[in-house]
Amino acid sequence: MHGPEPVYLVGPTAVGKTATALAVADRVSLEIVSADSMHVYRGLDILSAKASPDERARVPHHLIDVLDVTEPFSAAEFKRLADAAIADIRGRGKRPLVVGGTGLYIKALADGIFDGPEASKEIRSRLLAEAEAVGAENLHARLAELDPKAAARIAHNDLRRIVRALEVHETTGRPISEQQTEWQQPKPCLMLGLGMPRAALYRRIDERVEAMFDAGAAEEVECLVQAGIERSPTAMQAIGVAEIIGVLRGERTLDEAKRLIKRNTRRYAKHQLTWFRKDSRIQWYDATGDTTAVAPLARAIQEHIESAKSR
């Protein structure tokens, strides 16, 4: 494999990763590998804030629109596809920039995968049936009692990871968080983070949710339902899908869906920040102004490239 190791650009949702990555890629000549668990799905464009076709034409992007919304996806599958994309980019002598906010995927790519015990279909089916009866949040509350560290890292509505954590505990008798401490130690790499004051980030989230609805988020979900998204345990986790399906079914108003999406997105951003703040490799840059971080990020990446050449 030839070419430089990937550089990572991470941060919470709505902080401006896509626009910043595009501007940096223009300056340093990079190809972008998306590390967003929802960007892989065709048709899930507005709610996942995916780079537009014009933006993807401007800078090559990888791991966007590679799956139908009915297909499951995991950190292991992401790592497999991302490794292949990075090998392709490096093999052509180009430079990969991994951009995203899905912390587990970033960790898997940078440091390897925590495998854990084999899945138990019996336990998993029972937990999924229970979740359907009482809701994911009830299972999350049980996980908080059994494994508070894991529960703190897993979003209340992330059913797939909640079930996996409970399954591992039931299978092994040990908390998954305890087993994950045996995971590979962080490997050296250039990892850059975008941040901004919490109040400013929350304002951007609220504004983006309104813009998503103006752009046709409700119509997008209607199409996704027809495409079978409700059969997908992964794509259904996209914030906004379940909330808008409730509107389509007459279970809530559009205003109530907007309120829930804003709240759930803020919760997710807080969860992302908690995850990323624990990684001491990340060098943080203020993204309060739309372009304030571009020049220093480009400079850091260029210096990293030059340093790698001299080694």
Image: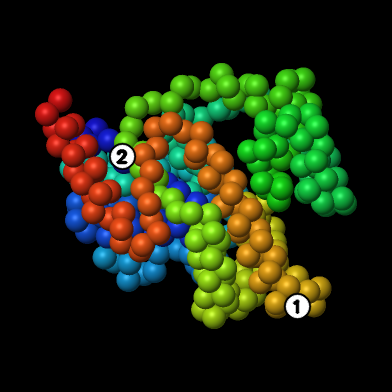
CA gap, disc 2 and disc 1:
44 Å
Q: Where is residue 49? Give x, y as percent.
A: 48, 64
For the C terminus, the image quarter is top left
Please name whichever residue, 42 or 241, is drawn nearer the observer in this view of the structure: 241
**Which residue in the rendered view is the most extreme toward the right?**
133
Q: Amino acid at mark 2?
A: Pro
Q: Is residue 161 above or below residue 201?
A: above
Q: Where is residue 60? Give x, y as percent.
A: 29, 58
Q: Which mark is residue 253?
A: 1
Query: Can you identify the residue that label 2 sits on?
Result: 6
Secondary structure of the residue carrying numbered label 1: loop
Q: Where is residue 122? Give x, y as percent.
A: 80, 34
Q: Amino acid at mark 1?
A: Thr
Residue sitting at x 54%, y 39%? 275
For the N terminus, the image quarter is top left
Residue sitting at x 68%, y 69%? 259
Q: Is residue 237 visible?
A: yes
Q: Is residue 100 visible?
A: no
Residue sitting at x 67%, y 33%? 150
